[in-house]
Image (cartoon, grey):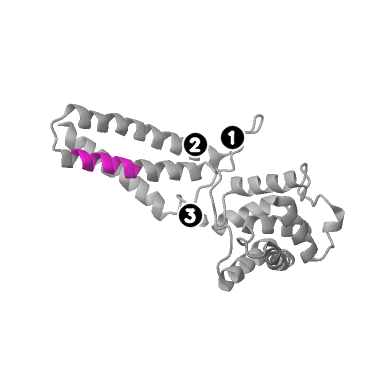
Amino acid sequence: MWVPVIAVGLCGLLGVGLVQLWRGRLTTSNGRDQLLADARYRTPGEPVGRDAAANLAIVALELLALALAAVLVGYLLVETALSPALKLLFAGTYGVAAILIARAAYVRLGLPVPGPADVDDPQTLDDLTDSLAESLGRPTAAEFEALYAAMTTARGDGPGPDVVTVALVAAARADMDVATVEYWAATNGIASPATVANRRDELATAGVLKADCFELARSEFQDAPAGDVASVTTTLLS
C-alpha cells in the first residue's frame, strides 16, 4: 500500500528539484531567477527580512520533506520484498532529488557559490563590461576592463583573474559601494552576495581594501595606473 504513495512523493520531490534546476537555483548561471538571501538572519540584532524569512521557511520545508522521504525509502529498501531493480530505482530517484534540492537550498540561503572565475573569450568580457556599465556606471566598467587586462598580463601564463575580485577593486577605485557590486553579481549570474562578501574579505585581509569600509587600503591606489594597481593586487593576493 505504501509503495505507490512513496513513489508519488519521490516524483514530487524530483519535480521540485528539477523546477529549481530550470529556475537557476543550483548555480549562479541564471541569477535573475534565484531567490538569494543576504544571510542577514545570521547577524545578531538585525531583523529578518521578508525575503530571507521566506527562503528559510522554504528551505526548512524542503529539508523536512527530504528527511521524511529518506525514512520511507529506507523502509522500502529494508522491509519490503520489492525486486532489486525497483529498490535501485527508488534509491536512485531519491538520491537525485536530494542532490538537486540540497544544492538549491544552499544557493537559496545566499551561501557562497562558485561563479565564473575568469573570462574565456572577448565576447564574454564585453558582456561583463556592458553589464557593469548598466549597473555601476561607465567609469566602473572602464576601470574593470583596464584592471582585468592588466591583471591578466600580471598573471602571465597562469589562470585569468577572478571576475568578482576585479570588479570589487574597480568599484572601490570608482567610489561605488559594495552593495551595488553584490546586486550586479547576483542579477548577472556572476556570484551570490555571500561570495562577493568573501572576496571582499580576502581583499581586506590582503591589504587591498580597508577592513572597516569599502575603500582602497592605500590612497595611492586611487589614481595610480591600472597596471600598477593590478600588479600590487596580484602580488598581495598570491
Mark 2 burial class by Cα count in 10 Å: few <14, some 14-19, many 20+: some
Q: Identify the mark nearer the N-term, 1 or 2.
A: 1
Q: Is residue 130 visible?
A: yes
Q: Position of residue 166 (x, y in %)?
A: 68, 59
Residue at (60% x, 48% y) in the render:
195
- From this view, report whether residue 46 is shown above or below residue 193: above
Q: Residue at x 54, y 40 (%)?
A: 52
Residue wearing tag 3: 33
Crowd tier of the residue under label 3, counting other residues whose Cα lies within 10 Å: few below 14, some 14–19, many 20 or above: some
Q: State the residue at coordinates (78%, 60%).
A: 229
The quarter holding residue 81 reads: top left
How crowded pointer 1 is (Cα within 10 Å; few <14, some 14-19, many 20+) is rated as some
**Which badge, 2 or 3, is on the more N-terminal residue?**
3
Residue at image mark 1: 41
Contact? badges 1 and 2 (CB < 8 Å): yes
**Place of residue 223 in the rendered image (x, y in percent of width and height, measured from the top left):** 84, 62
